[in-house]
Image: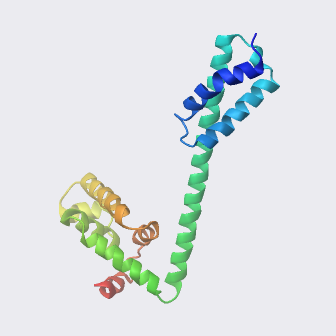
Amino acid sequence: MASFDDIFQEYYHSLLLYGLKFIKDENEVCDILQEVFAEVWEKEQYRLEGSHLKAYLYNALRNGCLNYLRHQEVVRKHAEREYIANSLAELNFYKSGEKSLIEEEDLKKIYSAISSLSDNYKEVIELSRFEGLKNKEIAEKLNIPVRTVETRLFRALSSLRKTLTGKQILILLNLSVGGQNNRMSLIK
């Protein structure tokens, strides 16, 4: 039977490489490995047979890495929701009073980005965001299937996400039809 130190020396490097397949941050993998080996020590798992111990170590590391990744996703989603909530609060603040110079600059950038889209995408975005038409109404007006409208909207927004900031996308998605003509005439 091997000692804990022997097991640590034998498996640490290969486990580290295995963990890096899941998580690209070596420090995080080392932290998870430390937890795995601490558990092995506390539960005296190092007394297991060689093949059982190896399987235990790799499974424990994999599970630790997957738990870490799930936690990071929760953290990311929380930060994203908080960013959106803050951005919406800021938008509501600016809507309640006079327009700020920042909002006008954002609107100019949004309009410029929309102008650079292909005619099909631009038309669908303008009908959706500036005229307030629903997908079905756009389809009827352009005499195309609703699914085509949805696809064009999706592709237009995907293209806009590449050129606009997150805040500008939120402004675009939250543009109200009422008063919008005034905003767009200001920009043009």
Judged from this view, the residue extending furthest toward the bottom is 98
Residue at 56% from the left image edge and 29% from the top image edge:
18
Which of 54 and 150 lies nearest the eye of the viewer? 54
Is residue 32 depicted above or below 90 in this figure?
A: above
Where the N terminus falls, by quadrant? top right
Q: Is residue 25 above or below residue 136?
A: above
In the image, taking residue 167 as reference, residue 118 lies left or right, namely left
Can you give x and y, in whole percent of width and height, for residue 19 in the image? 58, 33
Between 14 and 80, the one lying in front of the other is 14
User: Which image quarter: residue 6?
Assistant: top right
Is residue 113 visible to us here? yes
In this rendering, the answer to whether 50 lies above or below 93 is above
Q: Tell me where residue 170 sits by quadrant.
A: bottom left
At x 33% / y 88%, what residue is drawn? Answer: 186
- In percent of width and height, residue 174 lies at 44, 71
As rendered, which of 92 and 20 lies closer to the eye? 20
Examine the rendered structure and indicate whether residue 183 appears above or below residue 67: below
